[in-house]
Amino acid sequence: MNIAIFASGAGTNALKILQDETLQPFIQCIVTNKPQAGVVQIAKQFTKQVIVINKDSFFNTNQALHQLQHLQIEFVVLAGFLWKMPESFVKAFPNKIINIHPALLPKFGGKGMYGMYVHQAVVANNETETGITIHYVNEHYDEGQIIAQHKCIVDKNDTAETVSKKVQQLEHRYFVEVVKQLVVNHN
Ligand code: GRF
């Protein structure tokens, strides 16, 4: 299954996927709305095509969708991509778009809950555990069916910064495995 990775951040999760020898050949392109994002350099390092999208055309035309269809993309991985997916995408890739969220959904999800905001909220709420959620994507933020969750402990001395490190370790360990299961086992 040909894969597109949507990412607009540092790209550490995209990097893990690209470093995986099984998955790498399936990755056809990196889609981003931030041409300066770290993930773009990573894509270049792996000689993967970068597709830059802008909000107006993404939400009001089918241009990006057509580009992916032209590349025969069948599976979409959101790895640090903050925009909601347009309905046309969700319809075109039913149960074939997944996202990773740095908390245990349904807690700490929704609009504005991304990056350090998530971990700050976890600490402010005196949570004793947090983790990651890998889920299917629908038209609503962070609400699609959950595929996998992994937890870590939050203790009294933790700050948003230390929590983010623990969560990132879980992301780097488990995301690749889930993508592999969903993609490779279906070829
Ligand atoms: C990760 O924390 C992921 O859970 C969230 O966005 C972040 C992306 O980080 N959806 P990176 O760009 O892969 O380093």
Image (cartoon, grey):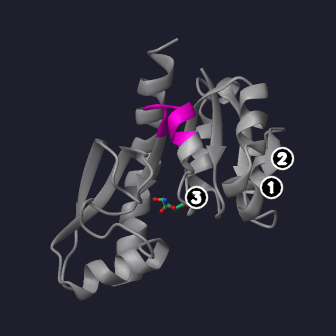
Tag nearer the camera, 3 or 1: 3
Element class at badge 2: helix
Residue 37: % across, % down: 74, 65
The three-letter amino acid code for the residue at tag 1 is: Gln
Label 3 within 8 A of ligand 1 by Cβ: yes
Residue 158 makes an appearance in the image: no
| Quadrant housing residue 3 | top right
Element class at badge 1: helix
Viewer-proximal residue, 127 or 108? Answer: 108
Element class at badge 3: loop
Q: Is residue 57 above or below residue 18?
A: below
- Which comes before the other along the chain, label 3 or label 1? 1
Residue bearing the label numbered 3: 81
Cα distance between the residues tagged 3 and 1: 16 Å
- Residue contact between numbered discs 2 and 1, judged by CB atoms under 8 Å: yes
Residue bearing the label numbered 2: 44
Residue drawn at (47%, 50%) of the image: 172
Which label belongs to residue 69? none
Q: Which residues are magenta?
A: 89-97
Residue bearing the label numbered 1: 41
The three-letter amino acid code for the residue at tag 2 is: Lys
- Which comes before the other along the chain, label 3 or label 2? 2
| Quadrant housing residue 175 | top left
The three-letter amino acid code for the residue at tag 3 is: Phe
Viewer-proximal residue, 42 or 107? Answer: 107
